Amino acid sequence: MEFSIQKADFLRGLRLAQGIADRKSTMPILANVLLRTDGKQRLLVAATDLNVAVSAELPAKIEKEGALTVSAKMLHDIVADLPGEDVKVKRSENLWAEIRCGSFESKLVGMADRDFPKLPEPGKIKYAKLDAPTLREMIDKTLFSVSNDETRFQLSGVLFECDGKTARMVSTDGHRLSKIERAVSEGPKLERGVIIPKKGLGELKRAVDGLGGACEIAVSGGAIYLKSGDVGLSVKLIEAEFPPYEQVIPAPNPVGALVPREALMAALKRTSHMTSDKTSGVKLMLADGVLKIISDNPDLGEAREELKVDYAGAPLTIGFNSNYFKELLSHMSGDRVRLELSGELDPGVVRGEASADYLGVIMPMRI
């Protein structure tokens, strides 16, 4: 195998590959990227951890056909620092990759491509179009509240639902929940929701980063497939039943507090310095036109701050994890958010002032 390729094109595929390659696996070849020629003008760059797989067909000048696998991270790091734009790669007889660029030369130990796992083949499935910025935004606004508890696998991903006209993503870790809906014109029509694992979602987001147009999505055979230009991605779905999330979301509360978003984030950041490391709990006290944020730690001290808000309901005191609040607010937009609080033991709902298609639910805590 011997080929030459532009550095920018090579890096585009290697960035995706090195994010998926599994360096901790007991199978050493899963830490490698597959390089395989495809005709005289294309190079396949692929990686998989057996759950997520990516392949990119990149323009290249093929001098000699063949294939090889090498360390995904090492090859990415080498190419990223190359001094020129024209990269030449050649497979030697001892399965090393010889890399040349300008006056730079390097040899990287490789492994035979025959040992590389077979890449998923979706076959003849029907793809539907989805706006790439919309997909990226939906992932970004739900990924942060996915559970990190691997024993609760039904919560270790994001629920994706779509009827062709409305796409929805929901995630929860049992303490908080995020839900976003977006109108789509030609989205996939799914009979039931599917759960996309956390790592797969991160790679889906990376695959569409920077795209301004549409990508293509399909769900088939326990996996979700994405096509974006010359990049293809497949993610194995989590085979589990997502909790009935609608039962967790309180009904809209006509009495809510309109609060300046950035001022609330800043106040929570200041007062959270005095919270317990274990709970990060703060107390919110709502009264006519005022929101008080209070933290009290016997070992450190106390802090409080008042914000002027638009609220005319009954006085209310409730405790929350300040980190959950700050993270949710950071993913919202607009000048003000609407806090819907019903009682000290009831979940709190946060919505954008003018947007009903994104909300967060935070469970209360006793303080």
Image (tube, rainbow, N blue to C red):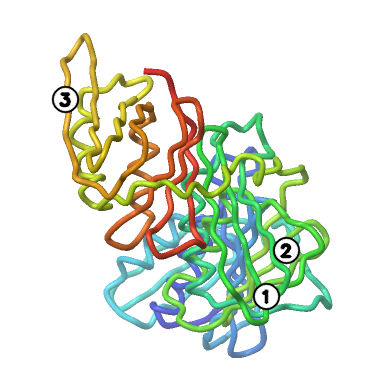
Residue at mark 1 to residue at mark 3: CA–CA distance: 47 Å
Q: Earlier in the sequence, mark 1 or mark 2?
A: 2
Residue 55 lies, with reference to residue 310, above or below; the image says below
Tell me where residue 271 appears, x and y as whole percent: 20, 31
- Name the residue tied to disc 1: 165
User: SS at mark 1?
Assistant: loop
Residue 268, image quadrant: top left
Around disc 3, counting alpha carbons within 10 Å, would you say few (fewer than 14), some (14 to 19), or many (20 or more)? some
Circle 3: residue type: Ala
User: SS at mark 3?
Assistant: strand
Q: Earlier in the sequence, mark 1 or mark 3?
A: 1
User: SS at mark 2?
Assistant: loop
Q: Are marks 2 and 3 in contact (CB under 8 Å)?
A: no
Nearest the camera: 346 or 29? 346
Q: Which mark is residue 303?
A: 3
- Name the residue tied to disc 2: 119
